[in-house]
Amino acid sequence: MEFILITLILIFVMTYRNSSGEGIYKFVKDQATVAYDKYAPYSYKVMREKIKDLGLEYTPRQYAIQVAIFSAIAGAVGYLYFYNIIVAIIYIVLAVSTIPYLTYLRCKRQYSEFIFEQIQVYTTNTIMEFATTQSFVKSLEGVVESGVLEEPVLSDVKTMIALSYEKGDVTDSINYMNSKYPYYMVKNMHQLFLQVTKEGAKNTEETFDNMLSDIDILVEGVYRDRSDRKQFHGQFLMFGISLYSLIMLIQLILGVEGYIELLDDIMMKILVHGVVAINSYFLLKGEKYYNENVGAE
C-alpha cells in the first residue's frame, strides 16, 4: 500500500513540476477545463459562460470547500464501513469525481431560472408596449430598445422582428419563439397577439390586463415552488447523509471486532458496497430532481 501511495504522489509531483511552476489549483483547474472543452456538450458550455457572466459560478474557495467536504464524508464512510484505507481512498476519488456532474446540474438550474425570469420580462414588457404601439412588431422593437432583455432572449426577439419584416407576417416569428421557449405564458400571449393581428380585434386592453394578472399569478407560483424545493433540498441532504450512519448501528449491535470478522466474507463485502452504492444513487437522483425543471411551468 505504501508503495502505491508513494508512486501516486511521485507521478503527481512530476506532472506538477512540468506545469511551468503553476499553482496546484490553477494546474488542476486548467486540466479540468481541457477535459470540459473536449467532452462537455456545447449547450453546457453556453450555460456555464452565462452563469459566469451573472456571477453565479463557484469561487475557487467554494470548490475547495466542496472537495474537502466530499472527501471527508467519503473517507469516513469508506473507512468506517470497511476499515480499509485503500477502500477509503477509492471512495474519496469516486465522490470527488461526481463534482463535475453536480456542477452541471447546478448550472442547468441557475440557467433555467435566468431564462424564466427573462421570459417573464419579455412577456410583460411586450404587453405593456402594445398598449402604446398597438402593433406586435413595434412592441417587440420597443422591448429590444428598452434594454431590459439579455442574451440569448435578446437575440431571439431580434430574430422575431427580422422574420416579421421578411415574411410580412408574424406567424413564422411566433412559431420560432414558441419552439425556442415553450412556456405557457409565451404561447398564450402569442396566441392572443396572433388573434389580434389576424382578426383585427379591438378593445383588447382588458384582455391584456387579465393576461398580465395571469402571468403575475403564474410567476408567484413558480417562485413559491422554488422556495419549497430549496427547503426540501436541505432536509433531503440531511436525511440522505444520515443514512450512511446506519452501519454504525450494526457495529453497535455486533461490536466492531464482530463486524470486521463479517467483512472477511466476500458476499458481506459486496452487500456493504451495495448499501453504499444504493444510498449514493438515492442522493444523486435527489440532486437531479432538485436541479431540473426549475423555473418551468
Image (spheres, grey):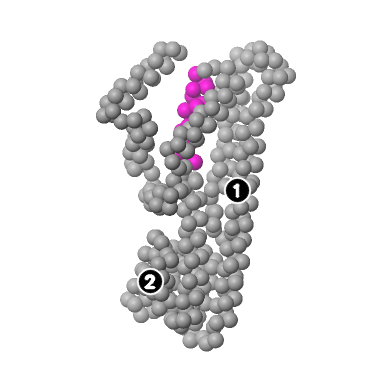
Quadrant position of residue 179: bottom left
**Residue at 36 percent of width and 68 percent of height:** 159
Mark found first going from the N terminus, 1 or 2: 2
Q: Residue furthest right?
A: 253
Which of the two marks, 1 or 2, is nearer to us in this view?
2
Choose between 26 and 177: the one closer to the eye. Answer: 26
157 relative position to 66: left or right: left
Asked if residue 267 is positioned above or below residue 43 in the image, the reply reads above
Q: Are marks 1 and 2 in contact (CB under 8 Å)?
A: no
- Binning the other alpha carbons within 10 Å of mark 1 as few (below 14), some (14 to 19) or many (20 upward) gives some
Q: Which residue is mark 2?
A: 145
Residue 187 in view in this figure: no
Q: Is residue 144 magenta?
A: no
Quadrant position of residue 263: top right
Q: Amino acid at mark 1?
A: Lys
264 relative position to 23: left or right: right
Where's residue 177, x and y in %?
Answer: 43, 67
Where's residue 84, x and y in %?
Answer: 54, 17
Q: Which mark is residue 51?
A: none
Q: Which residue is mark 1?
A: 230
Quadrant of the frame with the N terminus: top left
Residue 85 in view in this figure: yes
**Residue at 57 percent of width and 77 percent of height:** 209
Instruction: Find the magenta span and give its range.
Output: 86-102
Where's residue 185, x and y in %?
Answer: 54, 68
